[in-house]
């Protein structure tokens, strides 16, 4: 299945699941008055709203390239994720206000409701399944929006667990645990929002990818047998994907066609790495004196040379032999 169809299918699944959970929790919250269940209903309402936004956002990001967007529309996706974060913060603030007001007013009543326990148990199971599914698809399809959604579902498992503890505690004679559990849910909601913002800001500001991926990019370029070294290697996020530019160092006696083939091979091999989108390679012949040490290259690949390049090439050796022969004849 194509990336486009997969992401859209996941978005619709998220929306449907969150709407069902919101309706179930809302009905139980109205019947029982449990603040913990109410906070979970608010959380599911926020999930429903942002999952609808995700459906629209994923529709836009999976549109094919066009004249005005030759690199596609994937760069919209981090903005979708930040919208998700905004919804998460609103939901967390609402839960804090509701539970905090109840605690300050002392308006805490004991409740015993198997329905509240049951809906929270179902929610935990559903959110755990959604977390695993969204994380797997998000990583496989390189979708930051789905990874952000997976993290939100993971925290939903924890917050629903806290709500369950509060409801059970209230049923056992400690009603104060119900609003306290709602506060724990709110903290979990806000933590999710912070994680989503932190992860997606890097996509928007052009941050460098993880160090292990930068090292893999460099070693892939240096793996070509005709590449003697590299410098000025730059890898940065452009949306959820990575653009790479680097200078590769080759011997100057290569023909133009050979240099072109080397450049094309490096572009193809680096471009085959996960998350890498565009690759730009500049070829530096040794004789132009543009070879140079690069501390980043030395750190990742353990290479290093002086600016003059290797001691001599086969062509240089032949020239030197001819010069020695001429000097001998003159003598």
Image (cartoon, helix red, strand yellow):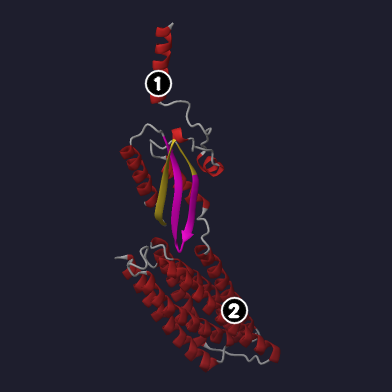
Residue 243 in the image: above or below residue 104: above
| Front position in the image: 3 or 169 | 3
- Find out whether residue 243 is within the magenta segment: yes
Q: Which region of the structure is painted magenta?
A: 232-250
Residue 83 in the image: above or below residue 198: below
Q: Are marks 2 and 1 in contact (CB under 8 Å)?
A: no
Does residue 118 appear in this view? no
SS assignment at label 2: helix
| Front position in the image: 199 or 311 | 311
| Residue in the picture at 33% in, 67% down | 67
Q: Mark 1 points at which residue?
A: 319
Does residue 287 appear in this view? yes
The quarter holding residue 99 reads bottom right
| Residue in the picture at 46% in, 85% down | 22
Please rate how many residues cluster around mark 1, counting C-alpha atoms within 10 Å: few if below 14, some from 14 to 19, many from 20.
few
- Find out whether residue 104 is within the magenta segment: no
Looking at the image, is mark 2 or mark 1 nearer the viewer? 1
The image shows residue 74 at horizontal and vertical percentages of 40, 66
SS assignment at label 1: helix
Is residue 169 rendered to the left or right of residue 240?
A: right
| Front position in the image: 305 or 171 | 305
* Quadrant housing the C terminus: top left
Identify the mark at residue 186; answer none if there is no mark.
2
Is residue 227 rendered to the left or right of residue 193?
A: left
């Amino acid at each position: 299945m194509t990336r486009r169809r997969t992401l859209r299918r996941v978005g619709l699944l998220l929306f449907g699941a969150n709407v069902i959970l919101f309706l179930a929790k809302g009905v139980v919250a109205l019947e029982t008055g449990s603040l913990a269940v109410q906070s979970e209903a608010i959380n599911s309402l926020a999930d429903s709203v942002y999952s609808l936004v995700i459906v629209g956002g994923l529709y836009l990001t999976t549109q094919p390239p066009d004249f005005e967007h030759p690199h596609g529309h994937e760069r919209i996706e981090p903005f979708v994720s930040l919208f998700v974060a905004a919804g998460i913060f609103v939901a967390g603030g609402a839960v804090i206000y509701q539970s905090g007001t109840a605690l300050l007013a002392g308006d805490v009543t004991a409740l015993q409701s198997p329905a509240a326990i049951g809906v929270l148990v179902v929610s935990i199971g559903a959110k755990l399944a959604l977390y695993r599914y969204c994380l797997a698809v998000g990583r496989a399809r390189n979708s930051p929006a789905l990874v952000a959604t997976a993290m939100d579902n993971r925290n939903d498992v924890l917050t629903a667990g806290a709500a369950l503890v509060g409801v059970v505690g209230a049923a056992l004679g400690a009603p104060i645990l119900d609003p306290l559990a709602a506060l724990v849910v709110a903290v979990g909601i806000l933590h999710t929002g912070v994680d989503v913002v932190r992860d997606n800001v890097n996509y928007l500001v052009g941050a460098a990818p993880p160090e292990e991926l930068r090292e893999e990019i460099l070693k892939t370029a240096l793996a070509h047998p005709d590449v003697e070294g590299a410098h000025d290697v730059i890898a940065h996020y452009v949306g959820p994907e990575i653009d790479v530019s680097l200078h590769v160092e080759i011997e100057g006696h290569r023909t133009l066609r050979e240099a072109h083939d080397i450049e094309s091979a490096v572009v193809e091999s680096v471009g085959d790495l996960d998350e890498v989108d565009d690759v730009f390679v500049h070829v530096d012949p040794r004789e132009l004196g543009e070879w140079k040490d690069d501390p980043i290259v030395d750190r990742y690949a353990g290479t290093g040379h002086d600016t003059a390049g290797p001691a001599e090439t086969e062509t240089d050796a032949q020239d030197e032999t001819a010069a020695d022969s001429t000097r001998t004849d003159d003598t």
